[in-house]
Image: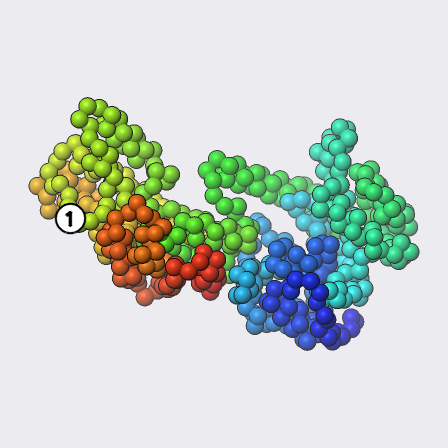
Amino acid sequence: MIALEAVSRPEIAGPPALGLLSALFARLHAERITYCHWKSNEHLRPSMLGLTDLDLLVHHGSASRLPQVLETLGFKRFQARPGRGYPGIEDYVGFDPDSGRLSHLHIHYQLTLGARYLKGHRLPWEDVFLMGRRLDRENGVFVASPEAEMLVLIARAALKIRWRDRVRSVFATSYVGGDTLRELRWLAERVDLHQLATLARRLVGEAAARILQEIAEVPRPTRSQLRDFQQQCVPSLDSYRIYGPLTGLVRQWTRELRSVGERVHRKVFGGLRAAPRTAPRGGRVVAIIGADGAGKSTVTREVGSWLSRQSWVITAYGGSGDGSASALRRLLERAARLARMLPGGGRKNDVDRTAKRSGGAGDPTALESRLTPKTFWKAMWVMSLARERRGKVAEAWQARSLGAVVLADRHPQTQFPGLSDGPQLTPWRSTGSRLLRFAAERERRAFEAMNRYPPDVVIKLLVSPEVALARKSARSENQLRRKVEVIRQLRYPTGTRVVEVDANLPLERVLLDVKRAVWESL
């Protein structure tokens, strides 16, 4: 039985760790929960600052008490997306309210490791790690002994050898490099070779122990040394397989193909990296709204980048900008530009400037009510925009249902026609032109369909007219004042949580307030 000793809080040198993590480890020690940070201790300090993940191996006797400790400190358990999880590993994410950083805990109840895209081996060495742990006094965290960590690091590297690595070795491409080599060199400076040999003989046999000692003393291990280590292990590392060879290969290829497909999709269509985890209570749609100059797009981009490290996040743009235009709307834009080039084609604001502002400025009823080339063009343009928005709202709801957090830059509303992403063609519902009435009715139905999918959270970025005008000097002052007031007056269903954020503050403070609101909604 592993002793559950109490630990006094050590003196921490250097930059302070996140308050959340300092509180976590103090609580783990007070509750006598047996754990150790079992790998990548070379960069434990960045992990304590919230810059990288923490990998904690927890004794099974403490497993029932750990979730309560984590929940008390505000950590939330995130679920692995289908086909992305591994046995014996749980993911918890915590939010540090002072810095706005997220801290990701990989909680391991068993040593599950293996090749890339497949942790297909379970090494039954958990008690060896936990009994040999030692306190890192700089960080106040129990860590694995360097001997145990080096043994598993080499075993992990050996298990990751694939047929493609044999091809690379023909061209003298080094197998061990990057983070693995840096960790290996860091550990080599700290291991006791005698203790390393004693531990290795006990767990993998005499022959493998000798090879491990050789690896610890060379600047860079070769693929041949790693292969020899794997082959000489007694018992064989293959005896610790979780899956059969064929099943494991299929799972590995499936994961790799999915990863490649996601990278290609991001390269072609843009977007954020899809994290392999989803929010604990399912997906959410978070709409970020505000007048011009409030910083909607900047906030959406920064918060998306922040959260996508730990959760599946999709960003959506609900405006009428050219970058989000469908093929039909881009065709209409080109037609308008060609029309302006013709003799008598008119100025841009005579054709499409107001249409591209989600209802235009000024009086929303100021629409020409008879059918002309310009009104026909606008009818087509607005119907195309409404169709795009309806599709985006439906896609956002689908993604939400699958567990994604959707961050929407703007969101459609029907309370103020002609303004702030509201319907533009409302005055045409009673016009004499059948075609214009048809366009207005199509737009009305699109907005009616979008209203069936209200956001879970609305974050109003409230900015004063003076600040908005300073940031968007090209806008009309009256228009900005009207839009600022509209954002304040917008109302949402009782099931939607509305959070107001002072967008006059510096960006860092605005982002922190928005991050807090998003985190509370997960």
Residue at the outermost left position = 432
Q: Quadrant of residue 32?
A: bottom right
Residue at the (32%, 33%) spot, across then down: 330
In this view, the residue in front, 265 or 512, is 512
**Residue 195: image x %, image y %?**
88, 58
In this view, the residue in front, 347 or 18, is 347
* Crowding near the residue tagged with mark 1, few <14, some 14–19, many ≥20 C-alpha atoms within 10 Å: some
Q: Which residue is mark 1?
A: 365
**Residue 276: image x %, image y %?**
56, 50
Q: How is the image coloured?
A: rainbow
Residue 255 shown left or right of residue 6 in the figure: left
Q: Is residue 522 above or below residue 439?
A: below
Residue 312 shown left or right of residue 411 in the figure: right
Q: Quadrant of residue 16?
A: bottom right
Q: Is residue 126 above or below residue 419?
A: below
Q: Quadrant of residue 443?
A: top left
**Residue 242: image x %, image y %?**
70, 51
Residue at the (61%, 59%) spot, across then down: 50
In this view, the residue in front, 75 or 402, is 75
Residue at the (52%, 47%) spot, across then down: 274
Q: Quadrant where the N terminus lies?
A: bottom right
Residue at the outermost top position = 343
Residue type at the position of mark 1: Thr
